[in-house]
Amino acid sequence: MDYRIRPMQPSEYSLLRDFLYQAIYLPEGTPPPPRSILQSPDLRVYIQDFGRSPHDRCLVAETAEGLAGAVWSRIMTDYGHIDDHIPSLAIALCSAYRGQGIGTALLTAMLDLLRKAGYPQVSLSVQKANPALRLYRRLGFTTAADHGEELVMACRL
């Protein structure tokens, strides 16, 4: 699979809405929620006014067919929040591109970008049943908090 990792352009920020929807983990057999779920304050925080803060960063994986995935970070009070100085991130891949190493490449590039920007760590939230948990652990994320079915994880940069 040929792809390249690049910064998301401001003209593409509206696509974060679609990627946020893709980032919602659905266990096998679970019907997808209505897209209106993206209006909930708990989810809007991931994309609302993206690009206005100097802490907002987004990388995309681009193929010949278009954007295959995105990883973005910002300082926000979200499910993965640790404190007001540590960015949280979200990552999403279109289903056709999962399992091909693109998510690993995106996340590795984001960790490098945040490290170079001087952040000491980054956090995220993941459901324990989500297969992406293995990726996060492999890349150095450790459990910062256990909330039953969901973990808050952090990675020292």
Image (spheres, rainbow, N blue to C red):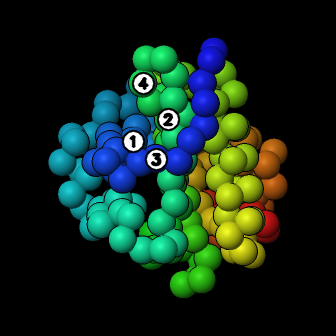
Kindly identify which numbered label has been placed on residue 147: none
* Callout 4 touching callout 2 (CB < 8 Å): no
Q: Dot 4 corresponds to which residue?
A: 66
* Callout 1 touching callout 2 (CB < 8 Å): yes
Q: Answer left or right for 51 relative to 147.
A: left
Q: Amino acid at mark 2?
A: Gly
**Distance of label 4 from label 2 (alpha carbons):** 9 Å
SS at circle 2: strand
Q: Position of residue 119 (x, y in %)?
A: 69, 74
Q: Nearer the viewer, mark 3 or mark 1?
A: 3
**Distance of label 1 from label 2 (alpha carbons):** 7 Å
Rendered position, 84 above or below 59: below
The numbered mark, 3 or 2, whose residue comes first in the sequence reads: 3
Query: Callout 4: few (<14), some (14-19), or many (20+) C-alpha neighbours within 10 Å?
Result: few
Q: Dot 1 corresponds to which residue?
A: 19
**Distance of label 3 from label 1 (alpha carbons):** 12 Å
* Viewport quadrant of the N terminus: top right
The numbered mark, 3 or 1, whose residue comes first in the sequence reads: 3
The answer to whether any part of residue 45 appears in the image is: no
Q: Nearer the viewer, mark 4 or mark 1?
A: 4
Q: Position of residue 120 (x, y in %)?
A: 74, 75
